[in-house]
Structure formats: structure tokens, C-alpha cells
Amino acid sequence: MDALLPNFDHLNQTVFVPDPETATSLTVENGSRFRIGDLVRPDGWNEVMLVSNVVANVLTVVRGYGGTPNATLEDDLRLIIIGNAAIEGAEAPTARFTNRARKRNYTQIFTASVWVSGSMQAARAHGVEDEADYQKQERLRELLRDLENTVINGVAPSNDPQGSSSVRRTMNGIVPSIATNRFAPGQGGLPDGGGTSGTVLTEELLNAALQRIWEQSNGPIDTIVMNGVQKRMLNEFIGSQRSFGPDDDSFRNLVNVYESDFGVCRVVLSRWAPADKVLLLDSSRIQVMPLAGRSFHYTPLAATGDSVRGQLVGEYTLEFKNENAHGLIGGLSVTGD
């Protein structure tokens, strides 16, 4: 996983000398993000400051650069780096870069057995031409169901994730893989939800989460995955705007695509999405992949006695790129109040 150099940081300072409106020595959390010549704007203010020196985490700045009105600084205020102004004819600046972090996920083996007695195979049940083939299809449907559930909710072990002949190997799903953008109503600057509890999914809450992800990602969210409970809440976004003509004989109450300033999102309904969560995903960075030659397949086994035996096997993993390009909203009401 790789990331661009951050273009913001936060003040880590409670005392400003002589005062928050004119102080020129500022302590930040990560001084390495700044360079001499950076133009910096305190979030929520119109002031622009010019960085004239950087020593460790202490910046020396020119306040009110370009005649902009001074801001009132405070601890933890976000400083946005507008850009750097180089001096004409200056030498090339010191190279800066981020270190790529290698993320990994392990494969998980999904398997089921098929066993049909000789008598059952010889008999012809109503609507079933071949009992062994019918059982293969049923077990395959179950394995596909389990794969979908695991892709969303699976968890890898904290120790020996590579597995062995005595340790089961499991893969991380989408929910445990999202670490950066985990939102909840009324927390971390997000608005409250609706209902008496303040945790009902609302359009304002959904848009605020989409904006947060968009601000730090170079791609938009294009997929929203949710359970039936939250899908009904999403459908209510248009509840007050529905209208019907005298000749209409169909009542439609659904949202299949949600379009906002931050992306056009296909809404996917999944039984396995946690009822109190909504997943916000960039599908171009997610892929479910089998180990080479290990997609679901059927292998006949040696019969023991008068029977037909076999095994369905598949080995899959979730490729989940750029974790901070995805997000989820948790702690949502499952009762609508």
C-alpha cells in the first residue's frame, strides 16, 4: 500500500506567545510534513501563513501573509498546506517520499462433502435426474453463500495467520480490514443521525462520511453495501419526494443508485452485512480471488461401500487495496428510532 505525502497536520500547542492571533512559533504534530516556503492555511480561517523555518516539530511562520486576516489559533487546529513556493534558480529540494507498506491477506479453504448411497443414486426422485449432481449443486450454493459472508465478516487469527496442518487458515474480510474511516453518528465531527436515538441513517450522515473518505482518497466511493434494515432507511431518503399519477398502478419504494457530489454509488443489498453498519467501498480496489487452480471444483473420492462420494473444494482470499479509500458507518439504529 502506498500513499501521497500528507498536505495537512494539526497544531500541538496550548500556549501561544504573545497570543493566538499573532504567535509566529507554532508546534505541530509532524514537522516533517512541512518545508520552508510552504503556504499554510488554518482550517476554517482565511489567514494564509508562510513557513520561514522548520526545526523538528516547530514552525516559524509569517502571519497574515498577503494581507489575509489573522486567525485565532488553538490546540489541535488543522493546518492545511496549500502548496510550496520555490525561489527562482534555487537548487532542487531534498527528496521526500512515503514508505510503501506491504499488506497481506491469507487464503481460506472452503470445502464440503457429497455422499449419496447407491440406492438413492439409482432411484429417480421427482424433479431430480441425478441425485449426486443435485447434491453437488446444493453444496456449491452453500459454499458460495459462506464465501460471500466471509468476504464481508471474516477474521484472520492474530497468531500464525499462515496456518498449518493443525492451525486453520482464515482470511480477513472487509469489515475488519477497514481501520481508518470507521464512522459513527455524532462522533468524530460527523452529524447525529435521525430518530429519537440520533443513530438512524440519514442522508446528511451518509454524505458527511462520503466526503470524509473523498477528502483523503484519489478515487470516489462507487458501492454501498448494506443489510435489509439499513436499505429500508436509505429508501426513506426519497420518501417525502414520491409522487404518483392517477394512472400509476405500481408503488415503488427503493433506491438502487445513490448519486452525490462525492460519487455515483451502486447500492448492494447483502444478507450478511452487519445490521448496524453501512459499507462504503471503492470496488476498483476490491477483488475476491482464488488461489491459482483452486477455484471451486469437484473431486470424486474413492467409494467406501455402496455409495458415491466426492468433495467440493475452493481456496479464496480478499484483495483489499488502499484501506483508507473505503469506510463504514457503524453504531446505526436497527429499529428506526
Image (spheres, rainbow, N blue to C red):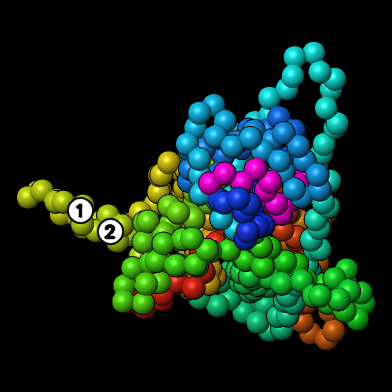
**Residue at position x 65%, y 43% from top?**
24
Q: How would you rate the neighbour count of disc 1 (Cα within 10 Å): few for under 14, some for 14-19, many for 20 or more?
A: few
| Residue 8 is one of the magenta-drawn residues | no
**Secondary element at image label 1:** loop
**Secondary element at image label 2:** loop
Say which residue label 1 marks: 242
Q: Most extreme residue toward the right, as rendered?
A: 165
The quadrant where residue 168 appears: bottom right
Does the image show residue 271? no
Q: Are marks 1 and 2 in contact (CB under 8 Å)?
A: yes
Say which residue label 2 marks: 253
**Residue at position x 38%, y 67% from top?**
193
The magenta segment: 21-33
**Residue at position x 81%, y 58% from top?**
104
| Amino acid under disc 2 | Asn
Q: CA distance from mark 1 to mark 2?
A: 8 Å
| Amino acid under disc 1 | Arg
Image position, residue 332 (x, y; %): 45, 71
Q: Nearer the viewer, residue 200 or 81?
A: 81
Give left or right: position of 91 versus 68: right
